[in-house]
Amino acid sequence: MDVRGCFYLKSSGNDDRLAIQNALDCCSNFGRGTVVLEGDFFVKGTLYISDYTTVIIRNGTLSALDKKEPLLTNSNRLLPRTRTLFGTQKGISILGENGCVSGKTELVNVSDFLVRGIKFLDTEEGVFLAYVTGGRLLDIDFCGVKSCIRAAIGTRNCYFSNIKTSKEEHSISFSSDRVDGCVVYYYGPDVTNNIVREIKSDKAPKSFGEWCKNNIIL
Amino acid sequence: MKNLSALKYDSFSSDSQMLNAAVMLAKESGTLVIPPINPRTGNTVYFIDESILLPSDFTVILDNCHLKLTDDAECNIFRNENLYKDGYLTKRGEQKNVRIIGKGHPVLDAAGHNDIFEWSSEKDGRPSVYVNNVILMHNVDGFEISGIEIKDQRWWGMNFLFCSNGTISDITVRTDSRFSNQDGINLRVGCHHIKLERISGVSGDDFIALSAIGNPEKYLVSGKSTDIAYVEIKDIIASSMHEGIITLRANDGHKVHHISIENVIESNYGNENVLPYTTLLLNQAAFFAKEPGRHGSMHHINVKNIYTKSGGAAITVGNTLLDSTVENIYASGCINVVTTLSYDHYGPTRLVKRGNSDDPNFPEDGISLERVTFKNIVADDTVKGAVMDFTSMRPDDFIKGSFAVSVIYPKGVQAPVFVKGKELPIIDE
């Protein structure tokens, strides 16, 4: 354990979930921290990220061994408070430094988050957002991903910039429709106040739903 | 690159001393990383009671850390090192290439207060209120501030004077407390060639202010223009508790010109008590030391894509504007879309028209326009007043070579209103 709050991990070559989660839990216990994954990592299951925690994927790929479960998500998803405004988490960052993620990232009931510099590979769904605010998704590539960014119910006040996709089904889809099993009481369904620019894709961003409005798509 | 592990932590009695020593040690390499956990105390917070002074050609990387001012601190968190030293008011004193880069989610936290407000500044032995800027930069050419949260600033969050060739990006401003003058970012006299991008949050006072006003003798750099020019502001999702979201002012012989403002969304982040009096203020004959700006003091201002949800107006125009365009203004929930009227708050949720004669800070409303185009001004049915209200004009105001194209408003919203003889032609497209 590094007393400065930065954890530098190397892969075991097998399932690294426990080692990475231990580092993430240390950050949670401290109240903030940074976990750097250097090289290729393999994870069976889900990694849970707490408030003010930064995950950096450096010079390698973080791969989900089970692509049906989310690979990365926020830690309050494990708690009943995830359905409440009390359970909003803050300051989660997922950064790539020549890094890739092969698996799904889900952020639900999170504010002021950052996903930057990641290449998402070979996964059905890249990023799923719901009930989030104040996020930045910047400089992201998708390759072999069917649904790149799904900005679902309650996604608001976010920036989506310099997003590059290959020939996928959706680059970004905004939708205020209800999502089964996903609710934050009193948050409201509005998908609004988002700014989208520099999307390099064959598929333009799409918007669905009665409460989807006032998003600037350039 | 240096980090704090090179230091003997025990030898410092405060976090500020440690960080300033770390900057000195890292000067040669030019980069210092401040990690999430304070190695001196094992705490997640670095308590700041002395400004961290930044040299030229230096980058400080805030690696997901939390720097907090102590309650009684009378200092900035960061400022450039030459400020207030011999020669700081000369070109010779100019610094170069100062960068503060956030990684992850670092926070510069000023919660609390030391009772140094604008009205108590330099009184009863107190220092200048300039100590309460979270980041203060003066006479710096080449700078970058990015990826940080400014929280509960005690005065203006960031203050730049005579700074140039810089980028301010990915900044979040969060103001939970309530007292006057909690601006987000101020560009003051002498700032030019600066880009602001992806700035979000809510401030107490003006969120982003470009104010070429006053004659701050302690900060005027000899030989440098006092104009604010060539500033690009884009992708702003923000609001102000009480004042304007983006405000431009040119008075006291200074000019503001060649400013581009694009993609501004008013957002209260779910707090219904947030009520700006305007999304965008284009000039104002107020807050001057000697005289309001003369015609020509604000020119070449290009505004595009403004989304307003509440407040007094989407666009408030004042004093003088020349050779400018304002287009794609989409307004709902506000009183007027484009207006010369100034509004003020009576309590957090009410806006009233400012008294012109009983408020010494605010002379008469009005605007002289020359070669200004308004295009695609759109009100929805929740706008309470007029799509354009130019009924408040001064006797000498004029409108020359200016017009509006495509002004759209539903039934129930008042048509454009002007003073007789000072009408802005409206052209249907």
Image: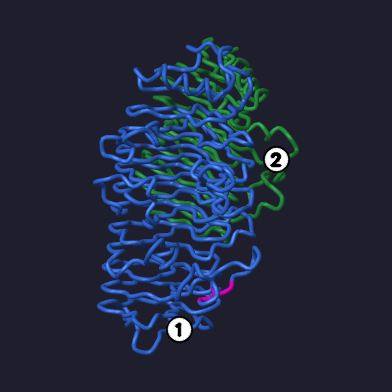
Q: Is residue A98 magenta?
A: no
Give how far across and how far down residue A97 sits, in percent: 41, 25
The C terminus of chain A, quarter of image: bottom left
Residue that numbered label 2 is attached to: A87
Look at the picture and state if A103 lies above or below B189: above
Kindly identify which numbered label has been placed on residue B415: 1
Q: Amino acid at mark 1?
A: Ala
Check chain identity for marks 1 and 2: say if they share one. no
**Residue at the extreme bottom:** B420
Q: Could you say whether the residue bearing mark 2 is in a helix, strand or loop?
A: helix
Q: Chain of mark 2?
A: A
Give how far across and how far down residue A24 sits, in percent: 61, 22
**Residue at the extreme right:** A80
Colour mode of the rendering:
by chain
Q: Amino acid at mark 2?
A: Gly
Could you say which is closer to the camera, residue A200 or residue B306? B306
Give me the residue at 64% from left, 60% from top: B272
Q: Which residues are magenta?
A: B352-356
Asked if disc 1 and disc 2 are in contact, CB closer than 8 Å, the reply is no
Q: Is residue B353 magenta?
A: yes
Look at the picture and state if A218 lies above or below B146: below
Q: Which chain is blue?
A: B
10 Å crowding of disc 2: few (<14), some (14-19), many (20+):
some
Give me the residue at 59% from left, 56% from top: A190
Q: Chain of mark 1?
A: B
Q: Is residue B333 visible?
A: yes
Q: Magenta: predominant secondary structure element?
A: loop
Q: Which chain is green?
A: A
